Image: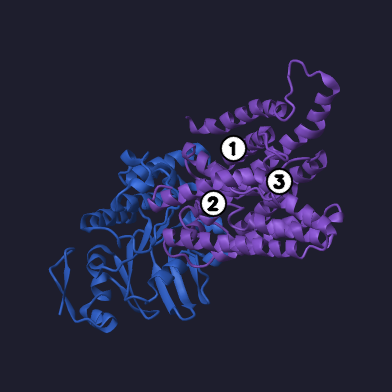
Chain colours: A blue, B purple
Amino acid sequence: MDLVADAVTMVGRLRDVRVGLSPGRLTAICGPNGAGKSTLLSALAGLEEPDGGHVSLGQHRLAELTARERAIAIGYLPQAGEVAWNVTVETLVRLGRLPHRTPMRIDAAATMAALQALDLTGLAGREVGTLSGGERARALLARVLAGQPRWILADEPLAALDLAHQQALLAHFRRLAGQGVGVVVVLHDLALAMNHADHVIVLDRGTVAANGAPHLALAEGVLAGVWGVKARWVGDGRSRALAIG
Amino acid sequence: MNRAALPLVLGGLLLVLFPLCLLAGQVWINPFDPAGANATVILAQLRLPRAVLAVIVGAGLGAAGAAMQGYLRNPLADPGLFGVAPLAALGAVLSLFTGFAVQPFALPAMALAGAAGGMVLLALIASGPRTGLAGGVALFTLAGMMLSSLAGALTSLAISLAPNPFALTEIVTWLMGALTDRSWHDVALAAPLTALGLVLLWRAGPALDALTLGELAARSMGLDPVALRGLMVVGVGLVVGAGVSAAGVIGFVGLMVPHIVRPFTDRRPSSLLLPSALAGALLLLLADSLCRCLPLAGGELRLGIALSLLGAPFFLHLLLRLRRGLA
């Protein structure tokens, strides 16, 4: 079921954005600060109604789905990662079952599966306030997984993580995509997008500047045009790095 | 303690303590020798309605505090501190001031309107952008307290302009918050309103849980913010308005009770609602019985004053804990 933005316009933030995303792939949204990455992500998640155009999931427009249908289909991981109360990891992850309203037994099974998928079973009883940054990021992602969505949209999930935890979380995202889930992440680190994404969308001042395979969308010409930085890719395969200057 | 057992324990305590509290007071009643015609009158006409009212008002304030804390994601939220109860009181005082209170339902109606209005203002302030949890809590607590002092100032204004000494005395005694000399009439008024409000707050439970993850994540899980705001405004408005019109302003119950029971739950706002209602009922029942027993020259200690004496240090203690990131 494709997630498609058709001529999405949000006054002052996005202009005529047309992108089509397919499940089973890891899509990265990149762009300079203020390019509209988070806005596009929340429009794709159905959290903001576009001023013009529309977002559709399969044959349905998102605006036509009920909030609950949308919540079951699309999991959204916000940037801030707020957890207001010092709940345990298991309680936190189980919150992801809220849209389903299924019997407790099914909720417990889905929660356990999500905890296992992110290697959190050992931390299930720990309070969120005692977790490290990497553990917390995994717990928040597990909350999304517990809802068993067909799409996972994450806003800068790697921002506060160190190198090792970035790699670990990316591996989780990749595995989810391998299982047929559509994964869309906003990424600031272009090298991570280059090496790990299947598909990259580059936004520039609210419009799509490039859209395609990483080596095309993040070609050196695009970097110069969008970021205004003279940079070149070094290395090869899935371990490329950006050399600036 | 097993988490599921908490409501049972609190409910059991309430069942045991309720009859015991009926016996306590300036006249102690011996349950094995309830002789004298007075005992029956004291029980049926004075203590029973008073204790029932304590349970109703306490349950309402405890649950309203728990729901407000969940809704505002603020452990310092309380209907009294954040202006909801003071605005309800302002509504009630205005009804006394203008003399509308002579009409049987004017005072409660204006108290309800005041409480709902206060909750609307809080919801509007809360729907603004929030930057960081700590900043949000501090800013919002201050905003709530300003609302509270504004309501207090307007109430004082009404008192200073009171048309006659009779209205003045009526306003002042009523404002201090107490359950003395309440009748079955007050119970009949407060009980259905509080019950309806509690049902609405209970229905808000899952949405409050979702809000734990912030408003954006909650909306992505299907939360309808407008519907939730409606539930909160009407629910808190009914519960606090009914409580205030029956007993005046009794502060800090909604602050203290959720804090005391939270460690015994899984800390989700929804799992806090029932224990907070039960514990709030217990707290007011016990506090009111103690007030009744304390020998004080010139009458008895007023319940609202007693709880403020307890609650203010508790609030300071919480603030200090928050500073260390423990709340």
Mark 3 is surrounded, within 10 Å at the Cα level, by few (under 14), some (14 to 19) or many (20 or more) other residues, namely many
B292 above or below A196? above
What secondary structure is found at the residue carrying circle 1? helix
State which quadrant residue B225 falls in. Answer: bottom right
Residue A111: where, in percent of width, then height?
42, 43
Which chain letter goes with mark 3?
B
Point out the tag, 3 or 1, that comes first from the N-terminus: 3
Q: Which residue is at 71% across, 52% downward?
A: B175
Residue reaching furthest front? Answer: B297
Residue toward you, A186 or B87: B87
Disc 2 target residue: B69
SS category of the residue bearing label 3:
helix
Q: In the rendered view, does B327 fall on the left or right side of A185?
A: right
What whole-number distance in Å separates the C-alpha atoms at marks 1 and 2? 16 Å
The percent coordinates of residue B262 (x first, y second) are: 49, 41
Crowd band around label 2 with a 10 angstrom C-alpha radius: few (<14), some (14–19), many (20+):
many
Residue A17 drawn at (x, y percent): 42, 77
Is the N terminus of chain A in the top left, top right, bottom left or bottom right quadrant?
Answer: bottom left
- Label 2 lies in what chain? B
Q: Is residue A99 visible?
A: no
For badge 1, the amino acid type reads Ala
**Residues beneath discs 3 and 1 located on the same chain:** yes
The answer as to whether the residues below labels 1 and 2 share one chain is: yes
Residue at the spot of label 1: B279
Spatial separation of the CA atoms under disc 3 and disc 2: 19 Å
What amino acid is found at the position of numbered circle 3 in the picture? Thr
Q: Which residue is mark 3?
A: B194
